[in-house]
Image (tube, rainbow, N blue to C red):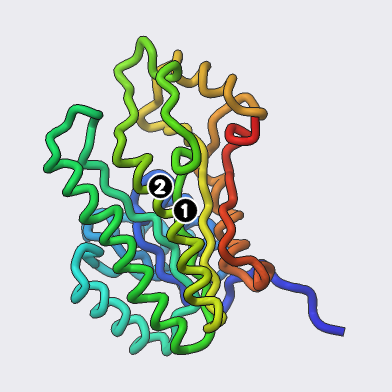
Amino acid sequence: MSEPPTFSLTDKVIVQFGGTGLLGRALVDALAAAGATLIVASRNRAALATLAATQQAVGHPVQIEEVDIGSAASLATLRDRVLGAQGRIDGIVFNAVSRPMSGYADDLDHWRASMDVNATGFFATVRTFGDAMAEQGSGSIVNIASQMGSIGMNPWLYEGTSMSAAPDYFFHKGGMINLTRYLASHYGKNNVRVNVVSPGGIYNPDTPQADAFLERYGKMTMLGRMADAPEIGGSVVFLLSDASTYITGANLPIDGGYTAK
């Protein structure tokens, strides 16, 4: 009788792109606690150093690497460094995001800047590391999208607040969800799985959203509230682990039922 699947990431080498923001830090907590050999990559070396010190203080030897996902050479250098040090790459988490647009009327240069990171940078990253995992014959890619990749903008949520929703975010997260399906098909023959999770709104205790927005948002969910960042990590661990070896091309909403209503 075969052993039951495990949710552990022990002995798995995982590279996480984007780990210094609210959600990124929560994902680092979850992956490190699950036992991953975790390399967190970002452009912000100072923030990475702070993250590493915080994790090491609780016994998680998280490694950090500086990378520019807009540069194919930078990505290739990081891939080769990880392979040289670890011998393999078992998974990546793409959580990097840039938000150069603040609203619909922004100059088109802001849209172009968003494309460089959120579209071109995303594809360059998953191709660079996906090809490496395909060559070794196994791996898991988990992309972090958003419920906003599956629905339109709801102006009612923002009425009477200074908050708004920029169009590039909807464009990129929707594209990420469908490109994930393409990538799952492309890499399936090489035993590399590609999935995407779509978190709903996440409450930020450091910069709380407007009370009116929080109340309205809660009414749009089945659970009556926004997510807390640590609630996202378990699903990402699952999709990286051996408990999900027959799941690929899937989009997992983690939105308190927002998109199911």
Lateral position of residue 118 relative to residue 191, left or right = left
Q: Residue at x 59, y 32 (%)?
A: 258
Quarter in which the C terminus is drawn: top right
Position of the N terminus, as image quadrant, is bottom right
- Alpha-carbon neighbours of circle 1 within 10 Å: few (<14), some, or many (≥20)? many
Q: Is residue 245 above or below residue 135?
A: above
Q: CA distance from mark 1 to mark 2?
A: 6 Å
Up-down: is 124 above or below 161? below
Q: Position of residue 143 (x, y in %)?
A: 45, 58
Mark 1 secondary-structure assignment: helix
Contact flag, marks 1 and 2 (Cβ < 8 Å): yes
Residue 173's label in the rendered image is: 2
Q: Is residue 47 left or right of residue 39?
A: left
| Location of residue 86 (image quadrant) | bottom left
Give how far across and how far down residue 61 sits, in percent. 43, 70
- Pick the front one: 34 or 70: 70
The residue at the point 36 percent across, 73 percent down is 127
The label shown at residue 177 is: 1
The picture places residue 37, in percent across and down from the top left corner, at 47, 74
The answer to whether any part of residue 60 appears in the image is no
